[in-house]
Amino acid sequence: MKRPEIENPKSKTENGLTRRAFLRLALLTGIAAGAGVIYKSTEAVGFERWFRWMARGQLARWFAPHARVALAACATYDADVLGAVRTAWTRAALPNLGGARVVLKPNLVDFVAGYPCFTHPRIVEAMIHLAREQGARDIVVAEGTTFRRDSQATLEATGYSALLAREHVAFVDLNYDDLGEIALTGGYTKLKTLFVAKTIRDADVVVSLPKMKTHHWTTVSASVKNFFGIVPGIKYGWPKNTLHVQGIPVFLAELVDSLPVRACAVVDGVVGLEGDGPIFGGAVPSGVLVAGADLLAVDATCARLMGFEPAQIDYLDFAAWAGLGVIDARQIDLEGDPLARFQRTYEPPPTM
Amino acid sequence: MDFLLQSQNADGGWGYRIAGMSYVEPTAAVMRVLPSSSARNAARDFLLRAQHADGGWGIAVADSESGWMTAWAVRALAELPEAHDAARRGGVWLLATEGQRITDPDARRVIQKLHKIDSALGGWPWQPGDAGWVHPTALAVLALVAVGQGEQARVRAGIAYLEDRACSEGGWNIGNPWMLDKQIPATIQDTAVVLRALHAAGETRSAGRVAQAIEYLRNAVARAQTPAELAWGIYALRDWGMGTGDALARLEALQQSNGSWNDNPFITAIASQK
C-alpha cells in the first residue's frame, strides 16, 4: 500500500524558499500592498484621520444607540401647526427648552414669487410658541441669507417681518453678527478654523427649521444644509462659495462635527419642494413635520419621505460613514405616524 | 450724524449695530460721510491699525486674512492725504488679487451651460482662493479708481467681468444671472454698487448693460421698502443723473428717532451719502 504523500512544510520551491516561507511572504506582500492602496487612497486627508473616521463609523454602526426621529401630520399651514410641532417635539424626545437661550434657524434662502423655497413662517411661529410654553429664557430667529446682502427685503417678502413684529421676537442677521472663531476639529476640509456668529456660539440650543426640498448640489436639503446659514456672509461672501469649494459633503460633515452648540431639527415638510431646488422647484404637499436630534437621521428620513435612498446622497453617506450620525433605517426608531403615510416621489433635482 | 458719532466704538470703529463688533466695512463707510473730526481721526487710526503687512484688510482686527473689505478701506483712506500710502498699498493688494478663473475649455463650456457666464473672466473674490463675484468686483473697481489706478488693465478686465455677469432683464445679482434654465433675479444693492463702479470708471450710458440696468434700478427703487435698498438705489441713480421720484422721501420716513436707519451704522452711513 502506497503511503499517502504528506506535504513537508520545509519542502522547497523552485527558488529555494520553503513553502511555508513562501506563503508567509505572499501574505506579507498582500498586507503591504493593501496598506499601500489604503495609504495612497487616503493621502489627501491623511491615513490617521481616515482611520479615525472609519473606526468611529464602524463603532457607531455596532454600538451607538438608535436615533429617534418623529413624524407628525400637519396637512396645511392653516391647520393646528403648534399642535403638530408639539407632537413632533415630544415624540422625538427633544430637550425641554426651559431656561434656555434658543435660536430658531429657518431656511430663508431667497424669495422668488411662486416658489415655496423657504420655511413657512407658520412653522417658526409655532416653534416660538412651543419654546415659550416650555419657558425658554430667550428666543431669537436667526438666518444668514445666501443670495442677498439685504436680508430685510427677504424678511418682508416672506412674511417674517410681520411674524417677528407680531411675536416681539428679535431677528439676528447671522451674516453681520459679532463673530467668534471656532477650531474645526474634524479635519474634513483644509480649513482649520471657522468664523461663526456669536448668537449661535452663545446659544444653548439651535433648532434647525429647514424646508424639506431637493437641491442641485446635495440632492436633498434639510436640517444639515440649513446650517450653511450660520456662517457669516461678511467673511465667506454671498453665496458663501468659499465653503462650497471645500467640498460640500466634507464641509457639511465639518459643520455637524464642530457645531459649538446643541442642535436639533424640526423640518417643514408640510409643503416640500421638488425638482429644481433649492429655489426654482415645484410644490409637493407632503403634510408632515420631521423632528429629531440626530441631524443625519432626520435628513435620511426626509430623503426617504421624498423617495430618495439616503446612502446614495453623498453628504449623508460620508457623514454616516464617519460616524457623525446614522442613516440606516435599522438604526432609526421612527415615532408617530408611519413613514408610508407621507411618502411621495419627489422629482429629483437636475444633474449639475 | 449724531447717531453715527454716538455709535462709534472705543476702538474707533463701527459695527453693523449699536455696540456691535467693529468691522472694516462699516468703519470705512461711516468715515467717508463724517466731516473732519476726532471721530474721523479715530476711525482712520482703526483702519491703519487693522491693515495687514500684505497691504490688505480682513473683515475685522481679528481676521488675519486680507479680503474684499480692503476695497472699502482703500476708498476711505484715499480721501485723507495723510493716509495715501496705506491706501496705495491696499490698491497694490487689490491689483494682485483675482478671483479664480477657469480656462480649461471643457470646464468653461460646462459653466457656460449651467450659468451662462464666461468663467475665464477675472473679477475680484470675497476671499483669495474664491471665484470672482459681482459685489467685491464693483467695490474693487471703485477703490482702484479712488487711488488713481482706474486705467489699469485689471480694472478694464473687472468691467468686462461685470458686463458678462449682468442679468438679461437688466441689473446684477451676486454674480449668477442664470441657474440652469432659470434666471436669477437682479437685486437693488448689487445693481447699485455696479452702476456706481461703472460711473466712477468713466463708463457711459451707452456702454454695455448700463442703460438696461438703470431702467431696472428705477423700477426696483420705486417699489423698494427697505432703507438699504432705497439708500443704495437713490445714490446710484443720482450718479447717473436720474430722478428718484419719492424714494428720498420714503427713505427719510424710515429714519428712526435716534437718527439712524435700523440702528445700523453701516446702513445709516449709506443713507447719509451726499
Image (cartoon, coloured by chain):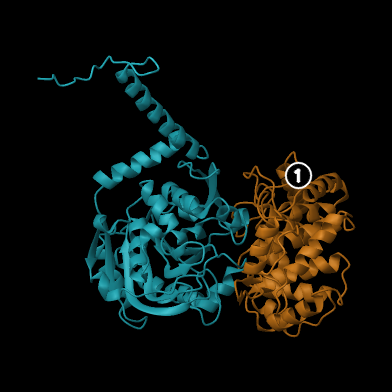
Chain colours: A cyan, B orange
Question: Chain letter of disc 1?
Answer: B
Name the residue beneath numbered marker 1: B48
Instruction: Tell me if mark 1 has few (under 14), some (14-19) or many (20+) residues whose alpha carbon lies within 10 angstroms of its own.
Output: some
Going by the image, does A146 lie left or right of A71?
Answer: right
Q: Is residue A268 above or below residue A243?
A: below
Q: Is residue B184 above or below residue B43?
A: below
Q: Position of residue A97 (x, y in %)?
A: 32, 59
**Who is closer to the viewer here, A108 or B185?**
B185
Residue at 24 percent across and 64 percent down: it is A90
Residue B146 place in picture, x, y as percent: 85, 57
**Image check: A217 left or right of A20?**
right
Q: Position of residue B191 (x, y in %)?
A: 72, 72
Q: Residue at x 71, y 84 (%)?
A: B219
Q: Mark 1 belongs to which amino acid?
A: Leu
Which quarter shows the N terminus of chain A? top left
Between A307 and A301, the one nearer to me in the picture: A307
Could you tell me which secondary element the residue under label 1 belongs to? Answer: helix
